[in-house]
Image (cartoon, rainbow, N blue to C red):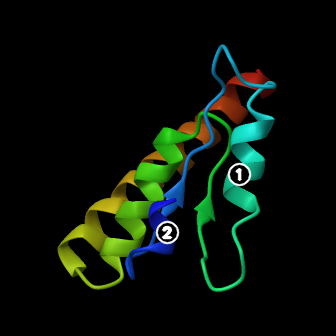
Amino acid sequence: MIASITPLPVIGVPIKSSNSIDGWDSVLSILQMPGGVPVATVALNGAKNAGILATQIIASNDNKILKKISQYKKLLEDKVKLSIKDLNK
């Protein structure tokens, strides 16, 4: 796995495929990395979350990106609040 040969952060995205055991083989291969080889892991088929996490990592050192990801997460919060209002109607 690439995480064993790079000093950069690695985000594992387990994928459910036609030849997998409901994606569990993919999940376990990412989670069972040996000590000293950290890999951030997102949900099964969680490529969107992997992208957001990567952006948040980059934003820790880039204020322009930090502002944009903060705005995006605020939009997500607003969508949830709107959904709650719709459910309460």
Q: In what element is the residue under mark 2?
A: helix
The answer for how far apart the CA atoms under marks 1 and 2 are is 12 Å
Name which residue lies at 80% across and 27% down: 88
> Where does the C terminus fall, quadrant-wise?
top right
User: Where in the figure is residue 10, as x and y percent of width and height?
Assistant: 47, 66
37 on left or right of 75: right
Name which residue lies at 76% across and 38% down: 25
Q: Is residue 70 visible?
A: no
Which residue, given by chain and number where applicable, does mark 1 sit on? 29
View extreme (left): residue: 64
Give above or below for 65 relative to 19.
below
User: Where in the figure is residue 80, as x and y percent of width and height?
Assistant: 62, 40
Name which residue lies at 24% across and 68% down: 65
- Between residue 65 and residue 7, name the one nearer to us: 7
User: Where in the figure is residue 43, as x and y percent of width and height?
Assistant: 67, 44
Give above or below for 53 relative to 29.
below
Q: In what element is the residue under mark 1?
A: helix
Q: Quadrant of residue 39?
A: bottom right
User: Where in the figure is residue 11, as x and y percent of width and height?
Assistant: 51, 60
Which residue, given by chain and number where applicable, does mark 2 sit on? 3
Give above or below for 5 relative to 51.
below
Circle 2: residue type: Ala
- Between residue 74 and residue 41, name the one nearer to us: 41
Give above or below for 48 relative to 51.
above
68 on left or right of 41: left
